[in-house]
Image: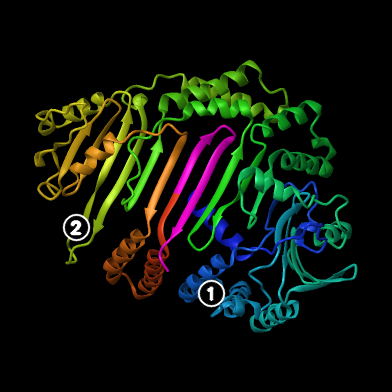
Amino acid sequence: MRTRILRHLALTAALVAVAGCGKKADTTTPLAFVPADTPYLFANIEPAPDSAIAHWREQMQGAWPLFTDMMDQMLAEVGKTDADSAVPKVLKAVLDEMRGRSTPEQWREIGFDPKAHAAFYGVDLLPVMRLELADPDAFRAMIARIEQKSGAALGTTRIGEQDVRTFGNDEARGLVAIEGKHLVVAFAAGGADEALERKLLGIDRPAQVLDASALADFNKARGYLPYGSGWVDTRRLVAMIAAKAAAGDPAKAPDATCRDEIDALAAKAPRLAIGYRDLDDKRMTMHARIELDPALAKSLSALAAPLPGSTPDDALLDFALAAPVLKARDFLVAQADAVTKAPFRCAELASINQGMAEAKAKLAQTIPPPFGDLSGARVTLSRFAWPAGEASMPDVAGTFLLGSSNPALLASLAQMTSPALAGIAIAPDGKPVAIPSAALPPQLAGKLDLDVAMTTSAIGVSFGKDEAQRLAAAIAAPTAADGTLFTMRLRGEMYAKFADAMDRFSASLPPESRKQLDTQRKLYALYAQWFDHIDARMALVPEGVDFSESVTFGAH
């Protein structure tokens, strides 16, 4: 999921958080090797706060043995199906080097430094990772141990005066070098000449290096902290891809018309930006933005629909999604109309013309109510517990809201399907009305309390004991017209609920599966201690589309 992607990026970046730069440009840091025309960059210009590093250390001391245990189990499975391959042996040797290393001091023993400068960037389209090492000799010694234990050695070559280790095949080759205190890992297509490999490794510096202040200015403009941030330049990336295709086969070189139209398409979403907005021992917030052409961003803003209800502070889980069905249809029709009136002339884009024409024909069809009336939905879980006894049902409570321009129609349709519902009066006053047990399936009758409430803009149902009051508060909550398309809150204690559920069902599994599940259960128990709550949001803003995830840590 998108929220997991953001979290993993945040944690990865944090582990390589970097030391600060002085006022003068430092020509020895990884950023000093980044070409000015790099199509993508993620780097750090200051160290993560000591409080954050201390907090990660505390977390990893409890979790690292479980992570390595999971990797052991995974490698054991891989070894059963791929016993003759060197890959499982190499991975196991790597894991053995990492095992037990849960503190910064222990990572320094194999050369790594949690306060190292680091940068991930592109030389043309090819990726390069450059990382400062605390002890290059300790890192070399670790590589030697891995090779000896696994029986698989990296290839060796010499590029200029630099010793380089290699891996891969004729189609793609990885390069690994230690230059001074820098570890450099780069990837090149098979058959790449030495001049390109020298550029990838930084033996030959770029003709124009990224300005030292460019990343700092980028951070300041977006409210990002200097602990990890960067971008993907869509226009530059697309132009480089086109140039590479033309270099390989001049017949594929796009003409002026195609270049202009392809660039115009890329300019609709010219950049993806990403960075930290909070990072300490209390909170970690990662933000990303797809920057859009102002006209496109303005037309997209029509999709903003107020979400029903609001997020209760004590909710175990709250999930809301905007669903402006008619507005979304109108937006897509407008895009199809624009292409129909001014079709692409570039032959490479002819499929877009055809696809838009077909989409317009389908979208022109009427969307009947109640689907066309929908504006959004929200599910809130306020209670989840397993009573004693293997056969017992979980005690679940919460609310479900549907935003609609005609909620009365939804109510009447529901009443038409059930004689038991037909006998209750549902007024648009927001007051909960009990749903009779006769309206429920036999297996739930008498075991689940349900209430329904309605306003002029939403209809909602509560489920579980003593939830009617929550339903009344939820459906009466003022909607926020702030462009939110999606929002989610998960309290850390939900992970404890997941762990309990795993424990309840693990007895019925075979021993090997039970072992894997038990490791996961222990991790979830740790997560319940680590996180107070996790919030994620996707929203339309004047600059484009925003994604954010904020993790608030529990007391420690």
Amino acid under disc 2: Met
Image location of residue 225, percent across then percent down: 62, 53
Is residue 98 found left or right of 447 in the rendered image? right
Residue 420 visible? The answer is: yes
| N-term-proximal mark, 2 vs 1 | 1
Q: Chief secondary structure of the magenta span?
A: strand
The disc placed on residue 108 is none
Residue found farthest to the right? 160
Is residue 434 found left or right of 183 in the rendered image? left
- Helix, strand or loop under label 1: helix
Disc 2 target residue: 393
- Helix, strand or loop under label 2: loop
Image location of residue 459, percent across then percent down: 26, 32
Q: Residue at x 55, y 61 (%)?
A: 11
- Choose between 189 and 499: the one closer to the eye: 499
Inspect the magenta stretch and tell me whether residue 183 lies in it: no
The disc placed on residue 79 is 1
Amino acid under disc 1: Gly
The magenta region covers 536-556
Above or below, comparing residue 319 to residue 503 in the picture: above
